[in-house]
Amino acid sequence: MTEDLTPAERYAAARIRAAEQATALAPFREMYDFGLDPFQIEACQALESGKGVLVAAPTGSGKTIVGEFAVHLALAEGRKCFYTTPIKALSNQKYADLAKRYGADKVGLLTGDNSVNSDAPVVVMTTEVLRNMLYAGSQSLAGLGYVVMDEVHYLSDRFRGAVWEEVIIHLPESVTLVSLSATVSNAEEFGDWLDTVRGSTEVIVSEHRPVPLWQHVFAGRRMYDLFEESTDHGGRGGARREVNPDLVRLARMENQKTYNPKDRRRGKMVREADRERERRQRGRIWTPGRPEVIERLDAEDLLPAITFIFSRAGCEAAVQQCMYAGLRLNDDSRRARVREIVEARTASIPTEDLHVLGYYEWLEGLERGIAAHHAGMLPTFKEVVEELFVRGLVKAVFATETLAQGRRSDPRAHGGLARPPLARHAPPAGRPA
């Protein structure tokens, strides 16, 4: 209570408030209806002081707030900000978010599929697009003040990591780099490398996971939690995570052998009998099909979900399999809403083309809450799937590993580039996001 403060304390508090209001962070915080976490505030303050930042934090912890602050700074300073992502689906989503906040006239989108308002002060793009702009000496780089590299841990991806490395090294010195990463084991080492190639870089690490990560196993027609919390009786107190004992029991049953190594005379006969018994047992093991898995996830309230299949044809076949099985995940009101959105988004496509594109089969799957998502689809179709998935109207998506990644070009030779020390980290999850 301010009434309890002395005049000197009230004066000091007023000076602090005035100092805070003089920074760009104060009005930025007012744009959100929630308070910022300490790591977000620390990263934003480092950015405002002119430093680059590397933010390593778990998925769902709010790293993108720091990227959005870079956008805020760029607009306040009359400079440009490029917001890069590793996948088109994420670019589309971020474009929609920023356009809603700052207005469509100030935000553009550049991917292999779309080019929207590319001369805007804020442009969302896949990382490959920015790499190509750097090598082409694009005029769009003029006035660039900030670059946000979302999911920068892709740097260690075997096939695409060179793109991130080249962008980091070849960006003009005047550009402030905002690197957002999932948790990595060597964040400090990676930060030292960024400090070497980009200049002063602040490393902010947060290990708090606000969104719990639960792992489940589907075995024997049942859904199990992979781990269970158990009381630690070893004197240390608290709880610890242990593998679900039911899964341990099932694994032991599966691996149980009848061969007795002491029986040397009949050893060969016993081994042959074991193999035959195992073949018969494997024939009786129930392997759930995709419709059964989706139905169980629905029953456990674990939808929406993305199933990764490393083939475009496989994604389409999975959708057909679920449709033939009669799987329906939407009620009548949701079906009507899906049809309304789809018809509005595809109104510009000629009717005769819809038949060729398999529109009606695609629409039937969407109405049921099922869809495929891969690079072979019409861009409009992919965007509709992404929109419906975000809205919760599509609950089961079968996607390729790339999940509509940015346009790839022939990888360039490294030519003696300094290799970044980002090899020891959790592997990047395939996302739509």
Image (spheres, helix red, strand yellow):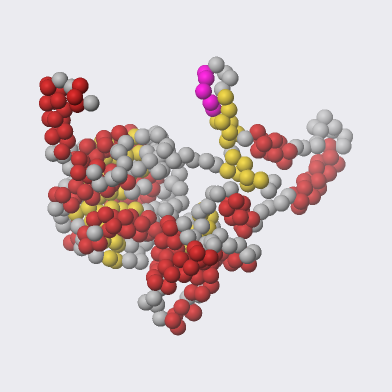
Q: Residue furthest front?
A: 3
Q: Nearer the viewer, residue 214 or 375?
A: 214
Q: Main secondary structure of the magenta part?
A: loop
The residue at the point 80 percent across, 36 percent down is: 259
User: Relative to 3, does residue 201 appear above or below in the rendering?
Assistant: below
User: Relative to 150, does residue 402 appear above or below in the rendering?
Assistant: below
Q: Residue furthest top?
A: 235
The residue at the point 25 percent across, 62 percent down is: 104
Q: Is residue 257 visible?
A: yes
Residue 350, position in %: x, y? 40, 81
- Viewport quadrant of the N terminus: top left
Q: Quadrant of residue 261?
A: top right
Decide whether residue 317 is among the magenta residues.
no
Q: Where does the magenta region start and end?
A: 236-240
Q: Nearer the viewer, residue 176 or 94?
A: 94
Decide whether residue 238 is among the magenta residues.
yes
Residue 113, position in %: x, y? 35, 66
Q: Is residue 181 left or right of residue 363?
A: left
Residue 136, position in %: x, y? 23, 61
Q: Is residue 174 left or right of residue 356?
A: left
Q: Residue furthest right?
A: 265
User: Relative to 236, does residue 429 appear above or below in the rendering?
Assistant: below
Q: Is residue 418 visible?
A: no
Residue 391, position in %: x, y? 43, 58
How many circles with numbers are drawn on the protein?
0
The residue at the point 52 percent across, 20 percent down is: 237
Q: Quadrant of residue 342?
A: bottom left
